[in-house]
Image (cartoon, rainbow, N blue to C red):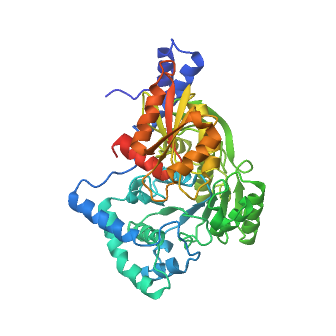
Amino acid sequence: MSEPSDPSDQFDDIVDAETDRDPDLAVIEAGSRTLRTQAGPPPGDPVPGRPEDPELDKALREVETELSTRWGETKLEPSVTRIAALMDVLGDPQRAYPSIHITGTNGKTSTARMIEALLGAFELRTGRYTSPHVQTITERISLDGAPISAERFVETYQDVKPYVELVDAREEYRLSFFEVLTGMAYAAFADAPVDVAVVEVGMGGTWDATNVIDASVAVVTPIDLDHTDRLGGTTGEIAGEKSGIIKQGATVILAQQPVDAAQVLLKKAVEADATVAREGMEFGILSREVAVGGQLLTLRGLGGEYDNVFLPLHGAYQAHNAAVALAAVEAFFGIGADHARTLDQDTVRRAFAQVASPGRLEIVRTSPTVLLDAAHNPHGARATAEGVSEAFGFSRLIGVVSTSGDKDAKGLLEAFEPIFAEVVITANSNPRATDVDVLAAAAVEVFGEDRVVVEPRLPDAIEAAITLAEEEAEYGGAGVLVTGSIFTVGDARLLLRRG
């Protein structure tokens, strides 16, 4: 049996094979491919489809139908009274394992996936709870880096259902859709059992249903204006709600924040006698280079530097998410406080190289390239626009946009205006999708009538955008970006990936 080749030899071989290309591009390509080789084969699609077994699919649909009769995620009664009552009758499953709690406006799910990948690489059994889902409800509850099976999802629901009904009968309002799912996640994690849970808030923090855990690490991704009718009209007010996940004696990992938000979060940390690590101070990005299929990073963690970290995701914001995720895992292991050392460098590199974040600048088709991105507010749209410009360099980009009715659609469109040659306005399958005529009127204000196309059905909108991208031979580098809502991305993903 032959000895495995040295990675440095692989790198040199690839560079030598790229003699007809620009030398700098050849080195970037070689570095990316070498790192991907060391990481092993890429994982399969992290988003599950419907169950192939008709009986199991029927059972899952029945559960989805029962859950849909409850308050949706946008109807809230701000308290944790009902979820606390459910945890009590379930025997407090959320206290059976340590947890990392994540709040913020944008980047929560990607950061959660990175934290999960790092913990899994260090051989810890993980549970991850995120929302909303891209395609299938089972995505929200993951064990060992993969969504739980439809069969296990149905079993978990049946297990907790009698206790849910007991709490429903006692409380003024029935448990909501999100509260039941949260109870299911915490019960599934205890049953697994997991070594650590990675939990993303649904909205806010203080009164979010997930906030019945006492997380040793609280993570706050960048805060911006979103859900202002429920969380507050300034980033400082929103930070006040989100700071509710900071528990006594915890370690708080803060991404870069607006000044007023940072002040609120730091004040809460002092009150809770929590240790704070701030991006740009105690940890951060030392260097970042665009690479083929992602980016190459040097990160400063709480315990030292990590170089040659290949992240197969696009955009500066994902690099910042990676820095936050690394610091959170270091804090979980006591690095930076109890220990002055780094995590194993090769393990960290391997974990990051295998990260996937469906619906975040995700390529689902080529010729022309079609990207999906779940940006749903102006802050997220600006980050996405920067990421597209940096990583793809399209000669012509066509947008396909459908937003949710409670979002700042005009602000989102303004963020995309500089990079979209034209925009196709449409609607997704969610009942809360912005009315097409209303969204089209906002688009005309931003883009002008000549740059706006309206196609009420998403399949027609995507086809129209692809046609526009292919229209003229000179636009060989044209592309399509489908965005505006996680629901838009989910629908498009089903259409384009046959999910």
- Front residue (pair 475, 442): 442
Residue 431 location, quadrant? bottom left
Residue 448 in picture, x, y percent from top left = 62, 37
For the residue pair 274 and 180, the one nearer the viewer reads as: 180
Q: State left or right for residue 43 relative to residue 81.
A: left
Above or below 219: residue 345: above
Residue drawn at (54%, 31%) of the image = 397
User: Residue 57, how many percent across, how many down?
Assistant: 26, 60
Q: Is residue 373 visible?
A: yes
The percent coordinates of residue 462 (x first, y second) are 43, 38
- Tell me the residue at 44%/35% (across/down): 464
In the image, taking residue 207 as reference, residue 281 lies left or right, namely right
Of all residues, the one furthest to the top in this rendering is 20
Q: How many marks?
A: 0
Using the rendered view, name the quadrant where residue 67 is placed. bottom left
Quadrant where the N terminus sits is top left
Q: Is residue 94 left or right of residue 496?
A: right
Q: Residue furthest bottom?
A: 170
192 over 329 or under it: above or below: below
- Please say whether residue 383 is visible from this viewpoint: no
Relative depth, front residue between 255 and 2: 255
Place of residue 97 in the rendered image (x, y in percent of width and height, measured from the top left): 49, 68
Residue at 58%, 48% in the rendered image? 343
